[in-house]
Amino acid sequence: MTKVKITIGGINKDAGSSKEYKTGGWRTMKPEVDVEKCIQCLKCFDYCPDGAVKKTDDAIEFDLDYCKGCGICAKECPVKAIVMKVEEK
Amino acid sequence: MSEKEDKEMFASGHRMCAGCGEGIAMRTILNEAGPNTIATVATGCLEVTTTAYPQTSWEIPLIHSAFENAASVASGIEVALKQMDKKGETNIMSFAGDGGTFDIGFQALSGMFERKHNVTHICLDNEAYMNTGIQRCSSTPYGASTTTSPAGKFSIGEDRPKKPLARISAAHDIPYVATATIAHIKDLKKKVRKALDADGPALVHVFAPCPTGWRHASNDSVELARLAVETGVFVLWEAEDGEICDLNITHKPKERKPVGEYLKKQRRFAHLTEEHIEKIQKEIDEKCEQYGF
Ligand SMILES: Cc1ncc(C[n+]2csc(CCOP(=O)(O)OP(=O)(O)O)c2C)c(N)n1
Ligand code: SF4
Ligand code: SF4
Ligand SMILES: [Mg+2]
């Protein structure tokens, strides 16, 4: 087990450090986007609880380090550009 | 897309369950508030999942208060900044779940309102004490099965209606009170902005479905928040300067959907019979009539 140094008052100056923890391993379903279909409405971006949808120049992409596979993006996409597939490990 | 939105103020890697409504709420709210914000958070799923020491998902200064006093700690921060002549430069926010707002945090919240601190309180409402295992709360709706209001042969589950937190808050004559959901992102952002810009206390009550506690599919969280509004289960409104007699309904469903569509997607309501659902429908009809639609 790694030892954690406790600071005085438990003060943590490492803002946003949860990014060190990769939640992608929780996933059982994996999103895939069809960039041809995407109209860049960014609904999937707004509705992702994990900040795992990234904007690209002409569509979106997923940050699979954090995507937990909830499937909200696929359900909310107005043009059905996202499908959920069983994760293969 | 503004630059502000490009830097995420709520970091990934938090431990919320897949599909958690609180995650959607927090990204929207913190991105709107921006970096010049200090927050307090009461104990609950939001705190536990975002502050696994030595990590944090918050990109802004945060104090984890006790379960009951997020609004008091925020009041203290506001007064301290005033003493330092930094009044009004920084957003001060307190965050709590429904348990930490409707029930145990209510005294602290009411005190913050009454003393007119310039604090925005955000209530993330998932209608039970989720972090400790789905116990009923005064926010739990009639008919929901929880671990302390279990449905059974002699029980319908929760047997009391939901406490009208936002209306009670507005009755404190504070500058801004609003209800919002995770399905209505633009509306949520606008309301958070108004709350932060108000000169004095504000409350934004955010409806945030919880797949684990409500026992629904993880991809249904946004759909359920939308259905709650379209069925009239949850009414979107805002009240400025305590105008509770003249609420501004911010989204009126064109045609209300039957409440069964909302209830049947959640296993916490799976035991309800058609008669129960009719009863709930009747109560919603009466409530919506009061709201004028
Ligand atoms: C004084 C006190 N009583 C009880 C608890 C245990 N406790 C921690 S979180 C929690 C439930 C939080 O529920 P809620 O505020 O609705 O947030 P949620 O987890 O549902 O998001 C309880 C009962 C506590 N931490 N402190
Ligand atoms: S919701 Fe669909 S169309 Fe909109 S940005 Fe995401 S993938 Fe593209
Ligand atoms: S129990 Fe519910 S509120 Fe808590 S992290 Fe899981 S989905 Fe979110
Ligand atoms: Mg709760």
Image (tube, grey):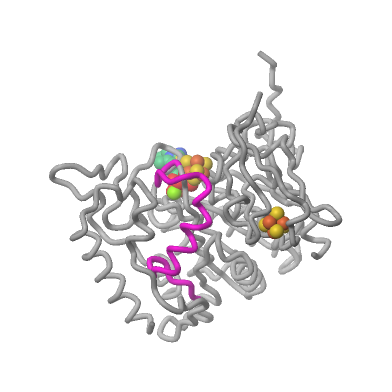
Q: Is residue B234 above or below residue B11?
A: below
Q: Measuring 46% from the left and 39% from the top, which residue is drawn there?
A: B131
Q: Nearer the viewer, residue B53 or B268?
A: B268
Q: Nearer the viewer, residue B212 or B82?
A: B212
Q: Nearer the viewer, residue A21 or B109?
A: A21
Q: Quadrant of the C terminus of chain B?
A: bottom left
Q: Quadrant of residue B200?
A: bottom right
Residue at the left extreme of this rendering = B154
x and y, in percent, of residue A8 in the image: 69, 31
Q: Is residue B284 left or right of residue A19?
A: left
Q: Main secondary structure of the magenta part?
A: helix
User: Is residue B56 shown in magenta?
Assistant: no
Q: Is residue B245 above or below residue B207?
A: below
Residue at the top extreme of this rendering = A1
Residue at the right extreme of this rendering = A57
Magenta residues span B212-237
Q: Is residue B177 above or below residue B269?
A: below
Q: Measuring 44% from the left and 41% from the top, which residue is drawn there?
A: B212
x and y, in percent, of residue B215 in the image: 40, 43
User: Is residue B225 shown in magenta?
Assistant: yes
Residue at the front extreme of this rendering = A36
